[in-house]
Amino acid sequence: GLLRRRASLEASFAEARRRGGLTKAETDALAGIGIDVGAIVDRVEGAHGEGALAADRSSRRWWSGHRAFTPGAKSILEKSLRIALGRGDRFIGQEHLLLALTATPGTVADTLAEHGVTHTAVHHALY
């Protein structure tokens, strides 16, 4: 059912990137102590341009055509491999990656959960 929610998911991920990768829970926790993340983002973007806090890696220079995985991406790939091996699969598929993403705490898992895509729901739908 994710394909039907693609536009909504993309908008949620774009908003998370705009907040500098802060999860909704982190934003709510900061609001609880009087820090308005939205106002801070607006001020930073007003001074430095739209998307100033977004983690944009496109401007980095690379010494070769090879792009190394970030530590977070390596972790997800390793978790996907463990899930695939645990299921007896001889490949890492989209389902393994999605399970790994939903099982790892952070912005991606929180954003997916806001749309009803939790590890339990994905596991139930797949298996």
Image (cartoon, grey):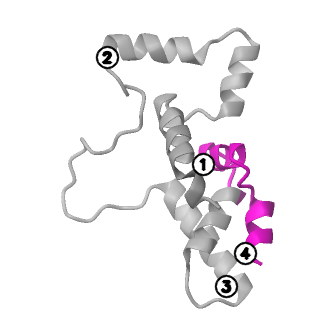
Residue wearing tag 3: 85
Query: In this figure, which residue is indicated by the disc labeled 2?
Result: 48
Between the residue at mark 3 and the residue at mark 4, the CA separation in whole angstroms equals: 16 Å
Closer to the chain start, of discs 3 and 4, is 3
Question: SS for tag 2?
Answer: helix
Q: Residue at 62% of width from left, 65% of height from top?
A: 98
From the viewer's perspective, is the residue at label 3 or at label 4 nearer? 4
User: Where on the picture, by quarter, is residue 70?
Assistant: bottom left
Q: Amino acid at mark 4?
A: Leu
Q: Which residue is mark 1?
A: 108
Residue sitting at the far front: 4
- Location of mark 4 (residue): 126
Mark 3 Cα shell of 10 Å, populated few (<14), some (14-19), many (≥20): some
Residue type, mark 3 in image: Leu
Q: Residue at x 65, y 81 (%)?
A: 84
Q: Is residue 80 above or below residue 31?
A: below
How far apart in space, not on screen, are marks 3 and 2 (Cα)?
46 Å
How far apart, in angstroms, are the residues tagged by discs 3 and 1?
23 Å
Inspect the magenta stretch and tell me whether residue 73 lies in it: no
The residue that appears at 46% across and 14% down in the rendered structure is: 42
71 on left or right of 110: left
Q: Is residue 106 left or right of residue 61?
A: right
Q: Residue at x 36, y 61 (%)?
A: 68
Distance of mark 2 from mark 4, alpha carbons? 44 Å
- First in sequence: mark 3 vs mark 1: 3
